[in-house]
Amino acid sequence: MSIQSVSGGVCAARGFRAASCAAGIRYQGRTDMAMIFSTVPCTAAGTYTSNVVKAAPVLWDRELTEKGAEIRAVVVNAGIANAATGSEGLRLCEETAKAAGQALGIPAESVLLGSTGVIGPQLPLDRLAAGIQQMAGSLEASDEAAEAASRAIMTTDTVNKQEAVAFELPAADGKGMVTVRLGGMSKGSGMIHPNMCTMLAYLTTDCAVDGALLGKMLRRVVKDTFNMITVDGDTSTNDTLLVLASGLAGNAPLLEGSAAARLFEEALYTVCRKLAIRMAADGEGATRLIECRVIGADTRDHARRLARSVVGSSLVKAMVFGKDANCGRILCALGYAGVDFDPARIEVLMENDRGRICFYREGRVLDFDEEKASDIMNGDRVSFLCDMKTGPAEATAWGCDLTYDYVKINGDYRS
Amino acid sequence: MSIQSVSGGVCAARGFRAASCAAGIRYQGRTDMAMIFSTVPCTAAGTYTSNVVKAAPVLWDRELTEKGAEIRAVVVNAGIANAATGSEGLRLCEETAKAAGQALGIPAESVLLGSTGVIGPQLPLDRLAAGIQQMAGSLEASDEAAEAASRAIMTTDTVNKQEAVAFELPAADGKGMVTVRLGGMSKGSGMIHPNMCTMLAYLTTDCAVDGALLGKMLRRVVKDTFNMITVDGDTSTNDTLLVLASGLAGNAPLLEGSAAARLFEEALYTVCRKLAIRMAADGEGATRLIECRVIGADTRDHARRLARSVVGSSLVKAMVFGKDANCGRILCALGYAGVDFDPARIEVLMENDRGRICFYREGRVLDFDEEKASDIMNGDRVSFLCDMKTGPAEATAWGCDLTYDYVKINGDYRS
């Protein structure tokens, strides 16, 4: 049983259709709304931002997914975040869900919402409603529709992010295997930091799985995928990761702890990991992906903290941008991760497809070949491998370099 | 009894002399070593980086100050941090202290050390020793010597940082009052983040005070001064704050809890606060100081965390650089500070000597005068005032904007 990449993004799984439109929420001359629709009621699960200031759609979605509502659609807009918008922002969520419910002939309580963009302004309900009307009439289950939807939710992203996989699970009728698909799209570029980000990610699957188990698997997977990326240390008000399961694949409903459930979770991990890495690589202004793999840590949680500290360091990020192997900064970032270790014991390497050098061992920065280091740093991806030499736990985090363009994008985002 | 600014930096207090020289450690054409010498043995106290990876001089100083050694001198170099240098780095500390002890005719164990610069390389002992020899012969108690010392310890700093104050305390002989002085110098520009930084700060006073009480006061004061500044979120390997007390003012030795002790602590706070704010304002590439004052918090610790989260946010920093009042970002940064609060209750204002606007109240970002906001943001200092409306606690944090020059300085620091 293997997991294979397939096309189709959010439309890869049976039962899902997508649409997008240019509603003119804030951007001009581009699409800025997307809709995902399921032909049948779905089980659903979500994970949301840990920020105390939660955007209105986050509150809306959390309530629905936590009470186990049957979900039929997701409506997303880019341009305005509907965050810090008070009771009016919550009212606009209700109105948006109602408009979608009417346009699609489903209950408003089966509609999830997502918003990304500037914090503060109120959403223009008339344009949202017009956009919903237009999208309801143009839903399609096609690669093109999925691709267009993934473009419509972008803000400062430079590329759209989609992924889908297929795998086989035992059939519900006990006769052989059926193909199950899981796909998704995501956006996120700035205000990205562990514990969910200005990151929106929507996954769809035709797997038969109940909402509680789906939620459990999602929370496990997110710890090693979306929560392991950082662009700028700012945990946003809007982060949302949703997964909808239509059950149309015809598999025997997943049982916790079964081989089938493990395979599904691995597929979920595969899709989330790919989308997460693409978001890190597309961090605002980024020119390259930074990866930090920590091995030999005493616990998984410590490994995660150490890895995130390295990819989150402004000085490491600026160093990768400048292709300057000022590697003491990696040590420094490990040192303030809040995890105790013996600096004399650990080993740190830099590597990618261009080569590998060890630059720290036995408590000191080694002399290394500067030319080789600079060649490695010219790659699209720079990986740091930190061996803590204390235990069996490992974790990987992803980030991106800090560039002039990051400053430019964020010094003048609203104009 | 009032606290007044005076000139003289580290030489303001009786008994202290300073010197500096161009030892050619790593920089060319500038001074890069400084020495502070006391004519009498001093009580001393220090606070050091919380980074697990501690530079060799940090380990050296910590051991001496913790065992209550009598201190006579401090030797500091810029250019190389003597961090991640293993056992060889520690040996170099011993040799440096020995060289200073010999040149000054004092025990090596009465010499504290400080280093700042690149992490990794070993210090060149011969140049250090030659520099020490030269400085031992040119010690002076003068404004000029103090000023030159404060320049010699700079790395990417654009201005030197000095401060000194004078105040009166009851005389040791019971006959009236004596004047006590407390002065200091500091450096720090990048790798600066709460909990001590690539920040070196050296304070001298002629106050009579024992080392234990001095340490207690220093630890209290540092929480609201040096630990409330951030430039880039990177807590360095070298942060050191030392205070030396010669006792030559002739005051009655301070008793814990006395009015005299309170006045001394206030003077200590005044000097540390001024040096800290100057470091934040001189953050690498900074064009303006960002201040965040949190009031109405339930606890002091929560107020500190909230204030630091705002001045530490890359998005807030980039926004101040771009003079773009995208104020939702303040809310976002408060929200991920790890402190619970009710977003519907708090109020946030932006202010400085150019004006004041309230931009968040009752759970939403208000409409505000963009022209006025942009005028305020043109000031040298931009202050955010966050009223949490839950309790009596307050705290202030300082940082600086994030600019193209920060990226430039740190993308190419070694060359």
Image (cartoon, coloured by chain):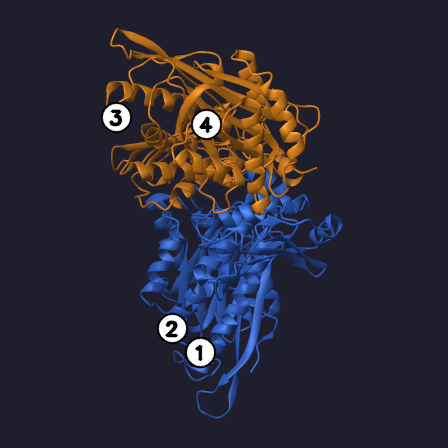
Chain colours: A orange, B blue
Secondary structure type for disc 1: helix
Residue type at mark 1: give it. Ala
Q: Is residue B364 above or below residue A73?
A: below
Disc 1 versus disc 3: nearer the observer: 3
Residue type at mark 2: give it. Leu
Secondary structure type for disc 4: helix
Disc 2 versus disc 4: nearer the observer: 4
Of pointers 2 and 1, the one earlier in the residue sequence: 2
**Percent position of residue A91, x then y:** 57, 41
Say which residue label 3 marks.
A256
**Percent position of residue B18, x then y:** 53, 65
Q: Residue furthest bottom?
A: B175
Residue type at mark 3: give it. Glu
Q: Confirm or deny contact between disc 3 and disc 2 (CB under 8 A).
A: no
Q: Chain of mark 1?
A: B
Circle on res. B213: 2
Q: Quadrant of residue B98?
A: bottom left
Disc 1 crowd rating (10 Å Cα; few below 14, some 14-19, many 20+) is: some
In front of the other: A241 or B116: A241
Residue at image location 55% in from the left, 42% down from the top:
A90
Say which residue label 1 marks.
B261
Q: Locate residue B312 relative to residue A245 in the image: left or right.
A: right
Disc 3 crowd rating (10 Å Cα; few below 14, some 14-19, many 20+) is: some
Circle on res. A276: 4
Residue type at mark 4: give it. Ala
